[in-house]
Image (cartoon, rainbow, N blue to C red):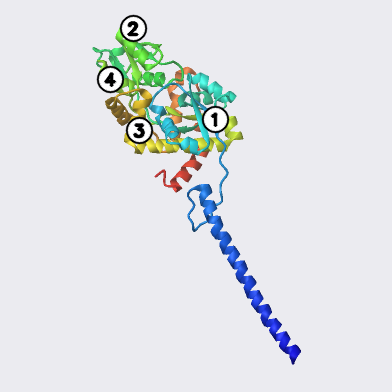
Amino acid sequence: MSCLGVDKRLAAFSVRIGFLVAAWLVALVLVGTAYEFPMAADWSGSVPSDSIQVEKAPRKTEMVRLGYSGPSMGNIPLLMANKRGFLADEGFQIQFIQARSNVSIAAVVTGDMQFTSATVSSASAAGRGVPIKVVAVIVNRPYQYFIVKPGINSVNELRGKIFAVDSLGASTTYLLAKEMMRQAGLDPDKDVKIITVGDAFARIAQMKAGTIDGTSMTPPQLIVARNQGFRILGSIKNVPELPSTGLATSEKLLKENPEQVRRMLRATVKGLAFVRDNREETIRLVMDHLKLDRAIAEESYELVRDAYSPDGSMSDQGFQLVSELQRDTGLKSNPASHMSDFSLLRQVQKQLKFEGILK
């Protein structure tokens, strides 16, 4: 009996020990959990006390170089993407490099630049077999106007006159100017002398000097010229879509580092959406970037806003028009797939719609 009593007391003691050990283990878990939540909050600065978040390793900053032809309204969404931190969010430190279109295209193909905003020139080069593709369109509608000396009241009155553009060949200014002349019944190769005079302000100076009779411009330079007494004749008609400013990159980068291109597209489309929806901040950026007073910046924004692509895309017809406008330069008709690749852009659009950034 005594042995049996001992056995019962030992069994009871063992049970009590088991409960104590179990309680001790539970306490350790609770203490450990309570200890680790503040640690997680300290690392991220934003983790709620009732959730666990694994700390992400910081993304390595990449330097990317983007070529552009000069200060313009077309580049405002890219500048906004930089200003608002959309590019930094994607791990980029960007260097904007001003260069002529042919120079930036060559640099993109060799890898010295990663991107260029010279969209029409890039599409034209791709149509000729250069390994480059347009991957997004920032401005997908023409917003170009003719501006002339006082006394010229119609495009048809440019017959026998001297008309200046920024450059010949695949230049948007040149191609659209010739199309506007054709729509007015002129033969641009015979009826008008077309010359190159460089940037818009140089052309304004040449009109003041009487060296040229007219030119083609976009806001804000257009408004500056009008305010100095020159006459706006109107804009091109019957051209619903045409790529002006955008993003182009090499086929090599598309193949070897599509993730870099995808992140660049994400930042660019976010910049586009922000510019279209945030008038006041965009006007302040236009004033700062283009050194304009508020009135000219506001008018420029209103003239250009609807020309910005809502999501970085454009129809195939717009690229087909590039070939058609260059029919007299020897460029053969090419399908849009020879000039552009929107496969990554479509992925980005889908993701940004899911996040509520795109409508």
Q: Earlier in the sequence, mark 4 or mark 1?
A: 1
**Dot label at residue 63:** 1
Q: CA distance from mark 2 to mark 1?
A: 43 Å
> Which residue is drawn at the image coordinates 58% and 31% (left, top)?
253
**Dot label at residue 282:** 3
> Can residue 339 be seen?
no
Frontmost of labels 3 and 4 is: 3
Q: Outermost residue toward the bottom?
A: 1
What kind of element bears circle 3? helix
Amino acid type at mark 2 = Thr
Amino acid type at mark 1 = Met
- Percent x, y for residue 13? 67, 80
- Percent x, y for residue 98? 47, 21
Frontmost of labels 2 and 4 is: 2
Q: Earlier in the sequence, mark 2 or mark 3?
A: 2
Q: Which residue is mark 2?
A: 211
Classify 10 Å Cα crowding around label 4: few (below 14), some (14-19), many (20 and above): some
- Percent x, y for residue 86? 46, 37
Left or right of 163 on screen, residue 9:
right
Q: Nearer the viewer, residue 291 or 264?
A: 291
Q: CA distance from mark 3 to mark 4?
A: 27 Å
61 up-or-down from 219: above or below = below
Q: Earlier in the sequence, mark 3 or mark 1?
A: 1
In terms of image quadrants, where is residue 357? top left
Q: Earlier in the sequence, mark 2 or mark 4?
A: 2
Q: CA distance from mark 2 to mark 4?
A: 19 Å
Frontmost of labels 2 and 3 is: 3
In terms of image quadrants, where is residue 358? top left
Q: Earlier in the sequence, mark 3 or mark 4?
A: 4
Q: Nearer the viewer, residue 208 or 53?
A: 53
